[in-house]
Image (cartoon, grey):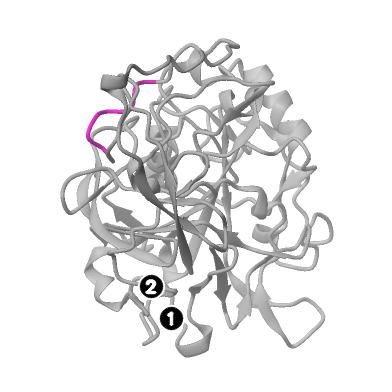
Amino acid sequence: MKKKVLAAVIIAAGLLVGCGKEEEPSLPVIQNMTPEPVATQTPEETQEPEEIEIDENSGLKMGGEDHPIVERIIQDGKMQSYLTGEWKDADVVQRRNMAVMIPNNNLKVPGTSDTNTVPQHGISAASIIYEAPVEGRITRLMGIFEDYDDLEKIGPVRSSRDYYVYEAMAYDSIYCNWGLAVPYVAPIINTDRIDNVSQALSGIDVGAPEAYENKSSGKGINAGYSLEFTSNITIAGYKKAVERLGYDTTYEEHGRFEQAFTFADDGYIAAYEDCPAATVIYPGGTKGNKGGYGSNTGDNAIRFEYNEEDRLYYRYQYGHPQVDAENDEQLAVTNVVFKICHGEPRDDHDYLTFGVHGTGDAYVFTNGKVIKGTWQRDSDYAPNLFLDENGDEIVFNQGKTWICNIWKEYSEYMEWE
């Protein structure tokens, strides 16, 4: 339900009043600063009051798609995150994030006859989660973390595929993996194209074993599972590795970061009232998509369910809520994206390739709506831009985002209701 109030609109020079009508500036050198007072208007500048709708549940102003964050400043040691739009410690916002490969397998629970997702620890702290198919048509996750200081570890950590590395480049991430598809990842990861904290395994020229706990079927956060599901990265070890390897630790130092997404500003909700509703989302559909996004059907299908009260999409898979084993919290995000990518098997091992540069169809789910458009990415270090059908940048609501790389050749299976 919504109610209407009147609010005066002050038009300041240079304010971006539309979504994507001007490019967001490159990451500036940011100093502590106090916002300047708004200049007093002359009678000639005074506008008639504009009618603004208020969302009764949240108290936020509607129309956030026309009121994005334009400039980020530091106030009282806080700054709006480039990854979520939320206010966080400025040091956290400005430092480079870590991108961690995480398995998403449904395996037998040790000592029982039950099956469940391999326990994932710390994943609920990720600001952005990527999901894409790998060989065998299961999906694998990559969490992008900026809030990790309160975590002891993240895991288990799994092996790399090149399309995840390319996606991490868009966020200037420090990439973390245990193992790799050597023919396709080694030529990228062993260069200065991507800073990485990789376990010292075959195919890695410079490893970082201090970042990882010993891998053993009897030890680790997932003891009892097979070896490839028992590794994890410790935050203390990660920081030691970053220092030893001499990586730049802030976006400004490294100079490659442009932006993640454009977010609605404080006090606003990007409502997209004219777009179709979509409150249950199935990236792989419900009909047995054995090719592109797992083979679960019906209630076992991977899905996101929208909750109107908190405006979050809750994640389910394998017939259960997907939870962080560290805190028993169900994974939930504010935005879900379908990025449609051409893909194909590339060898007898069934390693896949996905085109994550260029352009393609996209669907952005936020506030219980679906916005159809396109994605665009011009180079390794360019951001993913999500544009509506008019070519304007889609404005995300503040919070976490889950991006599903949908195999174009199987995109007919995706569905929502």
Give the magenta-colored segment's residue range: 20-26
Q: Is residue 279 left or right of residue 389?
A: right
Question: For residue 14, what is the image quadrant?
Answer: top left
| Residue position for label 2 | 278
Residue nearest the viewer, comparing 69 with 157: 69
Residue 26 drawn at (x, y percent): 36, 20
Residue placed at 43% from the left, 70% from the top?
Answer: 136
Residue nearest the viewer, comparing 57 with 354: 57
Say what amino acid the circle numbered 1 marks: Ser
Between marks 1 and 2 in the image, the one whose residue lies nearer the viewer: 2
Question: For residue 189, what is the image quadrant?
Answer: top left
Say what amino acid the circle numbered 2 marks: Ala
Residue sitting farthest toward the front: 43
Could you say whether the residue bearing mark 1 is in a helix, strand or loop?
A: loop
Residue nearest the viewer, comparing 15 with 326: 15
| Residue position for label 1 | 295
Residue 156 drawn at (x, y percent): 68, 54
